[in-house]
Image: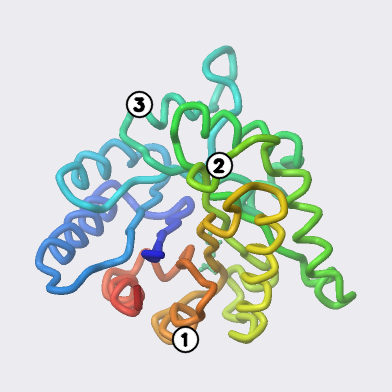
Amino acid sequence: MRQYIIGNWKMNGTKAEAQKLATTFVKRVTEASRPLPHIVLCPSYPYLTTVAEILKESSLEVGAQDCHPEHRGAFTGDVSAFQLKDVGCSYVIVGHSERRHLHHESNGLIRRKLEAAIKVELRPILCLGESAEEREQGKTFQAISNQLTSDLPLEFTPQDLIIAYEPLWAIGTGITPAPGEVEDIMGFIKHELSVRVTGGALVPILYGGSVTSLNAPTLLNLPHLDGLLVGGASLKLDEFWEIISASSR
Ligand code: 13P
Protein backbone atom coordinates (compact mmCIF):
# COMPACT_ATOMS: atom_id res chain seq x y z
CA MET A 1 0.00 0.00 0.00
CA ARG A 2 1.28 3.50 -0.83
CA GLN A 3 2.06 5.15 2.51
CA TYR A 4 0.53 8.30 4.00
CA ILE A 5 2.49 11.11 5.62
CA ILE A 6 0.07 13.46 7.34
CA GLY A 7 1.09 16.69 9.06
CA ASN A 8 -1.10 17.80 11.95
CA TRP A 9 -0.18 21.43 12.50
CA LYS A 10 -2.49 21.70 15.54
CA MET A 11 -3.08 25.34 16.69
CA ASN A 12 0.20 26.65 15.31
CA GLY A 13 1.52 29.09 12.77
CA THR A 14 0.45 32.19 10.94
CA LYS A 15 -1.09 32.62 7.52
CA ALA A 16 2.33 33.54 6.11
CA GLU A 17 3.91 30.42 7.61
CA ALA A 18 1.12 28.22 6.28
CA GLN A 19 1.60 29.71 2.80
CA LYS A 20 5.35 29.16 2.93
CA LEU A 21 5.09 25.53 4.03
CA ALA A 22 2.40 24.70 1.46
CA THR A 23 4.17 26.49 -1.42
CA THR A 24 7.52 24.86 -0.66
CA PHE A 25 6.05 21.36 -0.40
CA VAL A 26 4.24 21.78 -3.73
CA LYS A 27 7.52 22.86 -5.34
CA ARG A 28 9.46 19.94 -3.85
CA VAL A 29 6.79 17.40 -4.79
CA THR A 30 6.67 18.74 -8.34
CA GLU A 31 10.45 18.46 -8.63
CA ALA A 32 10.72 15.04 -6.97
CA SER A 33 12.31 12.40 -9.13
CA ARG A 34 10.83 9.36 -7.37
CA PRO A 35 7.32 8.24 -6.36
CA LEU A 36 6.18 9.84 -3.12
CA PRO A 37 3.68 8.79 -0.45
CA HIS A 38 0.26 10.45 -0.09
CA ILE A 39 0.98 13.79 1.60
CA VAL A 40 -1.74 15.54 3.60
CA LEU A 41 -1.41 18.88 5.40
CA CYS A 42 -3.81 19.67 8.26
CA PRO A 43 -3.67 23.38 9.16
CA SER A 44 -6.04 25.01 11.65
CA TYR A 45 -9.42 26.23 10.38
CA PRO A 46 -8.48 29.82 9.38
CA TYR A 47 -5.78 28.61 6.97
CA LEU A 48 -7.65 25.74 5.30
CA THR A 49 -8.78 27.69 2.25
CA THR A 50 -5.37 29.35 1.80
CA VAL A 51 -3.59 25.99 1.91
CA ALA A 52 -6.26 24.26 -0.22
CA GLU A 53 -5.84 26.93 -2.91
CA ILE A 54 -2.04 26.44 -2.98
CA LEU A 55 -2.31 22.64 -3.15
CA LYS A 56 -5.12 22.62 -5.71
CA GLU A 57 -3.14 21.65 -8.80
CA SER A 58 -0.74 19.35 -6.92
CA SER A 59 -0.91 15.80 -5.55
CA LEU A 60 -0.87 17.09 -1.98
CA GLU A 61 -4.16 17.13 -0.09
CA VAL A 62 -5.71 19.12 2.76
CA GLY A 63 -7.22 17.83 5.97
CA ALA A 64 -8.96 19.50 8.90
CA GLN A 65 -8.34 18.70 12.56
CA ASP A 66 -11.91 18.13 13.71
CA CYS A 67 -15.54 18.42 12.57
CA HIS A 68 -19.03 18.70 14.03
CA PRO A 69 -21.35 15.71 13.54
CA GLU A 70 -24.29 17.79 12.27
CA HIS A 71 -24.54 19.02 8.70
CA ARG A 72 -25.59 22.57 9.63
CA GLY A 73 -27.40 24.46 12.37
CA ALA A 74 -27.14 26.58 15.51
CA PHE A 75 -23.74 25.36 16.73
CA THR A 76 -21.73 28.50 17.40
CA GLY A 77 -18.03 28.08 16.81
CA ASP A 78 -18.34 24.65 15.18
CA VAL A 79 -17.58 23.58 11.62
CA SER A 80 -19.35 20.72 9.83
CA ALA A 81 -17.82 17.95 7.74
CA PHE A 82 -19.93 19.25 4.85
CA GLN A 83 -18.36 22.72 5.16
CA LEU A 84 -14.84 21.28 5.30
CA LYS A 85 -15.50 19.31 2.15
CA ASP A 86 -16.92 22.47 0.58
CA VAL A 87 -13.66 24.42 1.10
CA GLY A 88 -11.47 21.70 -0.41
CA CYS A 89 -10.62 19.30 2.42
CA SER A 90 -10.26 15.61 1.58
CA TYR A 91 -9.55 14.40 5.14
CA VAL A 92 -10.46 15.22 8.72
CA ILE A 93 -8.78 14.09 11.94
CA VAL A 94 -11.36 12.72 14.38
CA GLY A 95 -10.94 11.65 18.00
CA HIS A 96 -7.46 13.08 18.53
CA SER A 97 -6.50 12.59 22.18
CA GLU A 98 -6.26 16.37 22.62
CA ARG A 99 -9.97 16.57 21.69
CA ARG A 100 -10.96 13.50 23.68
CA HIS A 101 -9.34 14.88 26.83
CA LEU A 102 -9.30 18.68 26.61
CA HIS A 103 -12.81 18.81 25.11
CA HIS A 104 -14.17 15.72 26.87
CA GLU A 105 -15.27 14.11 23.60
CA SER A 106 -17.10 10.85 24.16
CA ASN A 107 -16.85 7.71 22.04
CA GLY A 108 -20.46 8.26 20.97
CA LEU A 109 -19.65 11.74 19.67
CA ILE A 110 -16.57 10.46 17.85
CA ARG A 111 -18.64 7.79 16.13
CA ARG A 112 -21.16 10.44 14.99
CA LYS A 113 -18.34 12.62 13.64
CA LEU A 114 -16.94 9.66 11.69
CA GLU A 115 -20.37 8.93 10.24
CA ALA A 116 -20.87 12.58 9.28
CA ALA A 117 -17.50 12.76 7.53
CA ILE A 118 -17.97 9.49 5.64
CA LYS A 119 -21.43 10.64 4.53
CA VAL A 120 -19.96 13.66 2.70
CA GLU A 121 -16.97 11.66 1.41
CA LEU A 122 -14.50 13.40 3.67
CA ARG A 123 -12.11 10.66 4.78
CA PRO A 124 -11.73 10.60 8.56
CA ILE A 125 -8.44 9.78 10.27
CA LEU A 126 -9.56 8.13 13.51
CA CYS A 127 -6.98 8.57 16.29
CA LEU A 128 -6.79 6.06 19.10
CA GLY A 129 -4.27 4.72 21.56
CA GLU A 130 -3.70 3.74 25.16
CA SER A 131 -2.80 6.00 28.08
CA ALA A 132 0.41 5.59 30.09
CA GLU A 133 -1.64 4.04 32.90
CA GLU A 134 -3.27 1.48 30.60
CA ARG A 135 0.12 0.60 29.20
CA GLU A 136 1.64 0.11 32.66
CA GLN A 137 -1.25 -2.18 33.57
CA GLY A 138 -0.72 -4.29 30.43
CA LYS A 139 -4.06 -3.13 28.99
CA THR A 140 -2.85 -1.68 25.68
CA PHE A 141 -4.55 -4.21 23.40
CA GLN A 142 -7.77 -4.12 25.43
CA ALA A 143 -7.87 -0.30 25.33
CA ILE A 144 -7.43 -0.27 21.55
CA SER A 145 -10.02 -2.97 21.01
CA ASN A 146 -12.52 -1.07 23.21
CA GLN A 147 -11.94 2.14 21.25
CA LEU A 148 -12.47 0.35 17.95
CA THR A 149 -15.70 -1.15 19.24
CA SER A 150 -17.12 2.12 20.53
CA ASP A 151 -15.82 4.54 17.88
CA LEU A 152 -16.23 2.75 14.56
CA PRO A 153 -19.46 3.30 12.65
CA LEU A 154 -21.73 0.29 12.37
CA GLU A 155 -21.24 0.27 8.63
CA PHE A 156 -18.16 1.34 6.71
CA THR A 157 -15.88 0.10 3.96
CA PRO A 158 -12.06 -0.08 4.23
CA GLN A 159 -11.77 2.85 1.78
CA ASP A 160 -13.87 5.11 4.01
CA LEU A 161 -11.32 5.82 6.72
CA ILE A 162 -7.77 5.77 8.06
CA ILE A 163 -6.72 4.82 11.58
CA ALA A 164 -3.87 6.50 13.44
CA TYR A 165 -2.43 4.71 16.45
CA GLU A 166 -1.22 7.47 18.76
CA PRO A 167 -0.25 6.26 22.26
CA LEU A 168 -1.03 9.16 24.59
CA TRP A 169 2.31 8.92 26.37
CA ALA A 170 4.19 9.36 23.07
CA ILE A 171 2.47 12.58 21.92
CA GLY A 172 4.80 15.56 22.24
CA THR A 173 7.03 13.76 24.76
CA GLY A 174 9.96 12.71 22.60
CA ILE A 175 9.33 9.11 23.69
CA THR A 176 8.25 6.49 21.15
CA PRO A 177 7.38 2.81 21.50
CA ALA A 178 9.97 0.31 20.28
CA PRO A 179 9.51 -0.47 16.56
CA GLY A 180 8.60 -4.08 17.44
CA GLU A 181 5.86 -2.82 19.74
CA VAL A 182 4.46 -0.56 17.00
CA GLU A 183 4.51 -3.45 14.54
CA ASP A 184 2.65 -5.75 16.98
CA ILE A 185 -0.03 -3.12 17.57
CA MET A 186 -0.41 -2.39 13.84
CA GLY A 187 -0.88 -6.13 13.24
CA PHE A 188 -3.38 -6.31 16.10
CA ILE A 189 -5.44 -3.39 14.71
CA LYS A 190 -5.43 -4.95 11.23
CA HIS A 191 -6.63 -8.24 12.69
CA GLU A 192 -9.36 -6.51 14.74
CA LEU A 193 -10.54 -4.67 11.63
CA SER A 194 -10.57 -7.79 9.50
CA VAL A 195 -12.98 -9.49 11.90
CA ARG A 196 -15.25 -6.41 11.95
CA VAL A 197 -15.49 -5.57 8.25
CA THR A 198 -14.86 -7.37 4.97
CA GLY A 199 -11.43 -6.38 3.71
CA GLY A 200 -10.67 -4.69 7.06
CA ALA A 201 -6.93 -5.28 6.70
CA LEU A 202 -7.01 -2.77 3.83
CA VAL A 203 -7.77 0.16 6.17
CA PRO A 204 -4.52 2.17 6.28
CA ILE A 205 -3.01 2.18 9.80
CA LEU A 206 -0.64 5.00 10.71
CA TYR A 207 1.56 5.65 13.72
CA GLY A 208 1.71 9.04 15.49
CA GLY A 209 3.61 10.38 18.51
CA SER A 210 7.02 12.11 18.59
CA VAL A 211 7.86 11.22 14.99
CA THR A 212 11.07 12.88 13.77
CA SER A 213 13.39 12.52 10.81
CA LEU A 214 15.53 10.29 13.02
CA ASN A 215 12.92 7.64 13.89
CA ALA A 216 10.84 7.92 10.68
CA PRO A 217 13.05 5.64 8.49
CA THR A 218 12.79 2.71 10.94
CA LEU A 219 9.06 3.21 11.47
CA LEU A 220 8.32 3.54 7.76
CA ASN A 221 10.05 0.24 7.08
CA LEU A 222 7.74 -1.71 9.38
CA PRO A 223 5.74 -4.10 7.17
CA HIS A 224 2.35 -3.35 8.74
CA LEU A 225 2.78 0.43 8.92
CA ASP A 226 0.93 2.42 6.25
CA GLY A 227 2.26 5.84 7.22
CA LEU A 228 2.76 8.48 9.88
CA LEU A 229 0.70 11.21 11.55
CA VAL A 230 3.24 13.87 12.44
CA GLY A 231 2.71 16.73 14.90
CA GLY A 232 5.54 19.13 15.81
CA ALA A 233 7.97 17.93 13.14
CA SER A 234 5.44 18.67 10.37
CA LEU A 235 5.86 22.42 11.01
CA LYS A 236 9.56 22.31 10.24
CA LEU A 237 10.07 22.47 6.51
CA ASP A 238 13.23 20.40 6.05
CA GLU A 239 12.42 18.03 8.89
CA PHE A 240 9.02 17.16 7.43
CA TRP A 241 10.49 16.80 3.95
CA GLU A 242 13.06 14.34 5.34
CA ILE A 243 10.22 12.33 6.90
CA ILE A 244 8.36 12.32 3.57
CA SER A 245 11.55 11.28 1.78
CA ALA A 246 12.04 8.39 4.22
CA SER A 247 8.86 6.74 2.99
CA SER A 248 9.75 3.43 1.45
CA ARG A 249 6.52 2.77 -0.48
P1 13P B 1 3.90 15.04 17.99
O1 13P B 1 4.44 14.48 16.71
O2 13P B 1 4.21 16.49 18.20
O3 13P B 1 4.27 14.17 19.16
O4 13P B 1 2.30 14.98 17.88
C1 13P B 1 1.70 13.82 17.48
C2 13P B 1 0.28 14.08 17.19
O5 13P B 1 -0.48 14.37 18.09
C3 13P B 1 -0.15 14.03 15.78
O6 13P B 1 -1.53 14.04 15.68
Where, quadrant-wise, is the C terminus in this rendering?
Answer: bottom left
Q: Is mark 2 within 8 Å of ligand 1?
A: no
Task: Report helix, strand or loop for mark 2.
Answer: loop
Q: Residue at x 62, y 77 (%)?
A: 182
Q: Is residue 240 above or below residue 4?
A: below
The residue pinned by badge 1 equals 218
Q: Nearer the viewer, mark 1 or mark 3?
A: 1
Where, quadrant-wise, is the N terminus in this rendering?
Answer: bottom left
* Neighbours of disc 1 within 10 Å: few (<14), some (14-19), many (20+): few
* Neighbours of disc 3 within 10 Å: few (<14), some (14-19), many (20+): few
Question: Upstream in the sequence, badge 1 or badge 2?
Answer: 2
Q: State the CA–CA distance, disc 1 to disc 2.
A: 30 Å
Question: Looking at the picture, which amino acid does disc 3 mark?
Answer: Asp
The residue pinned by badge 2 equals 157
Q: Residue furthest right?
A: 137
Q: Residue at x 27, y 45 (%)?
A: 51
Mark linked to residue 18: none
The residue pinned by badge 3 equals 86
Q: State the CA–CA distance, disc 3 to disc 2.
A: 23 Å
Please indicate whether residue 125 sits to the left or right of residue 53 in the image.
Answer: right
Question: Upstream in the sequence, badge 3 or badge 2?
Answer: 3
Question: Looking at the picture, which amino acid does disc 2 mark?
Answer: Thr
Q: Residue at x 43, y 43 (%)?
A: 91
Q: State the CA–CA distance, disc 1 to disc 3.
A: 37 Å
Question: Upstream in the sequence, badge 1 or badge 3?
Answer: 3
Image coordinates for residue 22, horizontal then vertical, percent: 23, 54
Image coordinates for residue 102, horizontal then vertical, percent: 69, 48
Please indicate whether residue 245 sits to the left or right of residue 114 in the image.
Answer: left
Task: Report helix, strand or loop for mark 3.
Answer: helix
Q: Quadrant of residue 85?
A: top left
